Image (tube, grey):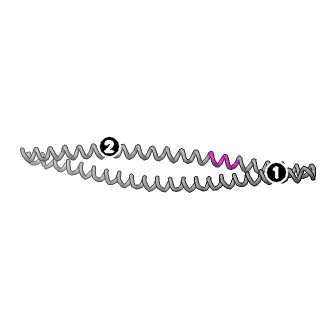
Amino acid sequence: QEEKKQLTLKVEELERKLETTSAQNIEFLQVIAKREESIHQCQLRLEEKTRECSSLARQLEMAIEDAKRQVEQTRERATSRERAAQSKMLDLETQLSRNKTELNQLHRSKDDAERRYESRLQDLKDRLEQSESTNRSMQNYVQFLKSSYANVF
């Protein structure tokens, strides 16, 4: 009976460990879902910045065309308007350059986030696999204990 009591305690302990492992697995799945949502949000921001850069590029092209038309209309107005257009063009190019830099940073940030996510995902997969292996081992041990117990009695 003492041996039966000890085996019962071990089985209960293993069941508690199994419940704990299951709870951890659920937590890991929640963390993965949050990470996926974060990556999705980053992708949406990246798409928004890409559209903004395209819009700025179109604005720059329109500004250049406008400056050319002004040059053709009059020589006197062309000089002052050309300076204004060049100034605007430089501002837009600077802004475009900043946006491209920001876009590149976002690309790097996205790539870094994906690498971290993949690394974390692989880590979680490895842990899950280890946990499942441990669960199988525990289940086999519990089955062994049950069969041993059945054989003893």
For the C terminus, the image quarter is: top left
Which is nearer the eye, 3 or 103? 103
For residue 67: magenta?
no
Residue occupying the point 58% across, 55% down? 105
**Residue 34 picture location, percent across and down:** 45, 44
The percent position of residue 36, horizontal first and vertical second, equals 48, 46
Residue labelled with disc 2: 23
Q: Which mark is residue 84?
A: 1
Residue 52 in magenta stretch: yes
16, above or below 116, in the image = above
Q: Quadrant of the N terminus?
A: top left
Nearer to the camera, 61 or 37: 61
Q: In what element is the residue under mark 1?
A: helix
Residue 18 coordinates in the image, percent (x, y): 26, 45
- Inspect the image, locate mark 2, and give the three-letter code of the amino acid beneath it: Ala
Total marks placed: 2
| Residue positioned 50% across, 53% down in the render | 113
**Residue at 8% across / 47% down in the picture?**
3
Mark 1 residue type:
Ala
Q: Secondary structure at mark 2?
A: helix
Coordinates of residue 38 in the picture (x, y in percent): 50, 46
Q: Is residue 43 left or right of residue 22?
A: right
Q: Which residues are magenta?
A: 48-54
